[in-house]
């Protein structure tokens, strides 16, 4: 499988759907979002996200026999699993006295309010009022369409009739059952677009991640291709030294000269993904000629100034992932990104002259600017 390369980001029909390995679905050793603080908005700036989108609310392993609270687009959601194991999402506010349903109990396919015991089905309809025989049909709570794919729980926050599961970006990068993946979570006190733009311009590698990643050859703007809804960048490095982060898992000498094709895609407001596809024209005896590392960035707004950041890495080679070691390294790299994003957010919020400041873009920003345009178009379309 090492030679299989995804050349561009396009419609979901072009890719084959797969199931990610079971350990990708089940492992939950990550820092969970803080349900108390995550819903607090720290600025009055207008929201810059579309509602008609599939957003990642959780990793599947976070849903067990008890409901959890997750804030998505300033909406408090109660997530839980029904009797058949499928995921469900209800607005967290009981319509009786506004008690949080996430503090309640799962009963079969329903969620029982912890305050007075009213039960709500996965469609939001109240099914039981313990103190009376009849249930007023008007008592209901908003329910949200849910899909579980690639190990993650996706919720649709917009118009229900537009909640087409096919709109979830297809991330079936390969169909080899030996492929392995690792995932993680980080919370960021910054706008989700800052994180998206961060992974659409990798020229920051040579500066922000020079020590942690050791990838310093991103010294020119990438090529950029666009469709109506997607943006793809690509940078090719011909016979360049292989950094340790790519060499070690592939069993290659650090610094060996290989061809490297680095690409990434803005697939939706919620999803960026990409890969490093490597070609060693002179592999060692029994060594790999082609190998790839895929990475997924899933950014979900909590509020205008706070973001859920789920990530995943998938590779088609090398020894089995050491989850703890991989997450420790990822915490360093993504921690550098988030520290910068949070510093930028702080600058934007606290500077008294921010309305007088201008933002200047350069050639390397093209992919990010194209992504902005597509999100702006989606937001404006919902306002018509």
Image (spheres, rainbow, N blue to C red):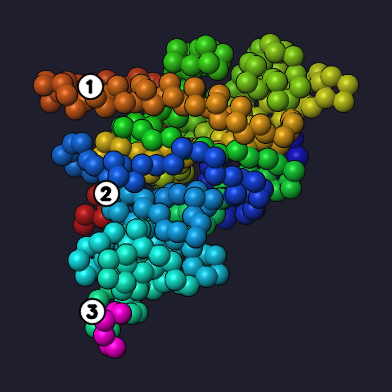
As drawn, 270 above or below 252: below
Q: Which mark sits nearer the N-terminus, 1 or 2?
A: 2
Answer left or right for 232 relative to 161: right
The residue nearer to you, when weighing 19 against 199, is 19
Label 1 element class: helix
Residue where numbered disc 1 is placed:
347
- Which residue position is annotated with label 3? 138
Position of residue 275 measured from the top left corner of the image (x, y, whole percent): 59, 33
Mark 1 → mark 2, Cα distance in angstroms: 22 Å
SS class, disc 3: loop
Q: Which residues are magenta?
A: 129-134
Q: Quadrant of residue 91?
A: bottom left
The residue indicated by pointer 2 is 74
Marking on residue 222:
none
Question: On screen, 211 above or below 144?
Answer: above
Who is closer to the viewer here, 330 or 383?
330
Residue 6 image offset from top left, x and y in percent: 62, 39
Image position of 381 (left or right of 249): left
């Amino acid at each position: 499988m090492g030679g299989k390369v995804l050349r561009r980001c396009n419609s979901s029909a072009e890719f084959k759907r797969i199931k990610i390995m079971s350990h990708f679905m089940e492992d939950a050793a990550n820092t969970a979002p803080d349900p108390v603080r995550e819903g607090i908005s720290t600025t009055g700036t207008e929201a810059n996200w579309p509602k008609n989108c599939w957003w990642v609310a959780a990793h599947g392993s976070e849903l067990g026999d008890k409901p959890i609270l997750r804030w998505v687009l300033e909406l408090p959601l109660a997530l839980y699993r029904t009797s058949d194991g499928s995921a469900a999402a209800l607005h967290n506010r009981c319509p009786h006295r506004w008690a949080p349903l996430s503090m309640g109990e799962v009963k079969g396919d329903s969620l029982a309010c912890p305050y007075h015991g009213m039960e709500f089905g996965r469609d939001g309809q109240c099914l039981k009022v313990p103190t009376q025989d009849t249930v007023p049909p008007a008592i209901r709570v908003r329910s949200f369409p849910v899909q579980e794919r690639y190990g993650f729980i996706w919720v649709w926050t917009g118009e229900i009739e537009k909640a087409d599961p096919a709109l979830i970006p297809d991330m079936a990068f390969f169909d080899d059952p030996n492929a392995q993946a690792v995932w993680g979570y980080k919370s960021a006190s910054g706008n989700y677009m800052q994180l998206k733009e961060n992974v659409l311009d990798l020229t920051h590698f040579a500066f922000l991640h020079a020590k942690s990643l050791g990838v310093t050859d991103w010294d020119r703007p990438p090529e950029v291709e666009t469709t109506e809804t997607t943006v793809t960048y690509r940078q090719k490095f011909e016979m360049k030294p292989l950094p340790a982060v790519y060499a070690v898992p592939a069993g290659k000498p650090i610094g060996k000269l290989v061809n490297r094709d680095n690409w990434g895609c803005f697939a939706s407001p919620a999803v960026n993904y990409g890969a490093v596809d490597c070609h060693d024209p002179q592999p060692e005896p029994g060594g790999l000629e082609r190998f790839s590392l895929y990475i997924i960035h899933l950014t979900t707004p909590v509020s205008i100034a706070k973001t859920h950041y789920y990530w995943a890495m998938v590779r088609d080679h090398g020894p089995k992932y050491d989850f703890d070691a991989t997450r420790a390294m990822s915490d360093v790299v993504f921690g550098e990104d988030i520290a910068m994003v949070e510093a930028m957010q702080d600058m934007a919020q606290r500077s008294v002259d921010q309305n007088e400041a201008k933002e200047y873009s350069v050639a390397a920003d093209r992919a990010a600017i194209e992504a902005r345009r597509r999100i702006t178009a989606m937001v404006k379309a919902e306002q018509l």
